[in-house]
Image (cartoon, helix red, strand yellow):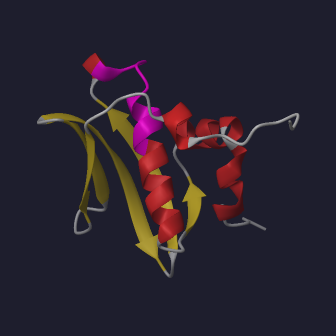
Amino acid sequence: MTAQQPHNPVDKIVHHGLRLDQDADRGRYSLWHGSTFVGFLGYRLEDGVATIQHTIVNEEFGRRGYARALVTLVLDRFRNEGLKIIPECSYVQDYLRRYPEYNDMVVDAG
């Protein structure tokens, strides 16, 4: 038994029936719960680096884990695509402090 168990994605996504849609032309990923629009994450992609600009969740879904699910799904997709990230969004910056397993994706500003 190890002192620190690795984070399991199930811990970060507590909702079932979520769908992530990409709109590359608008630079956003939209999160849906069934047929209901929950929110979106805006990004700009350049040279294999995604600058995450903002995470917006509709007020009725606030404080219920949807923003965390949205960021988790997007970061997992970016990782699978071999992308690096620049987290301009304050929510994503906070998320990365809570889930440091994604910090290897962050581009060094220096």
The residue sitting at the left extreme is 35
- Image position, residue 91 (x, y; %): 53, 36
Image vertical order of residue 89 relative to residue 51, above or below: above
The quarter of the displayed image where residue 27 is located: bottom left
The quarter of the displayed image where residue 4 is located: top right
- Image position, residue 15 (x, y; %): 35, 29
Q: Residue at x 72, y 65 (%)?
A: 109
The residue sitting at the front extreme is 1
Query: What quarter of the picture does the N terminus occupy?
Result: top right
Q: Residue at x 42, y 71 (%)?
A: 45
Image vertical order of residue 47 relative to residue 92, above or below: below
Q: How many dots with numbers? A: 0
Q: Residue at x 46, y 44 (%)?
A: 71
The residue sitting at the bottom extreme is 47
**Magenta segment: does it hold 107?**
no
Query: In the figure, is residue 28 to the left or right of 109?
Result: left
Magenta segment main secondary structure: helix
Viewer-nearest residue: 92 or 18: 18
Q: Residue at x 50, y 36 (%)?
A: 10
Query: In the figure, is residue 102 to the left or right of 39?
Result: right
- Image position, residue 8 (x, y; %): 60, 41
**Magenta segment: does it hold 68?**
yes
Residue 50 at least partly seen: no
Image vertical order of residue 74 relative to residue 38, above or below: below
Q: Which residues are magenta?
A: 61-70
Query: What quarter of the picture does the C terminus occupy?
Result: bottom right
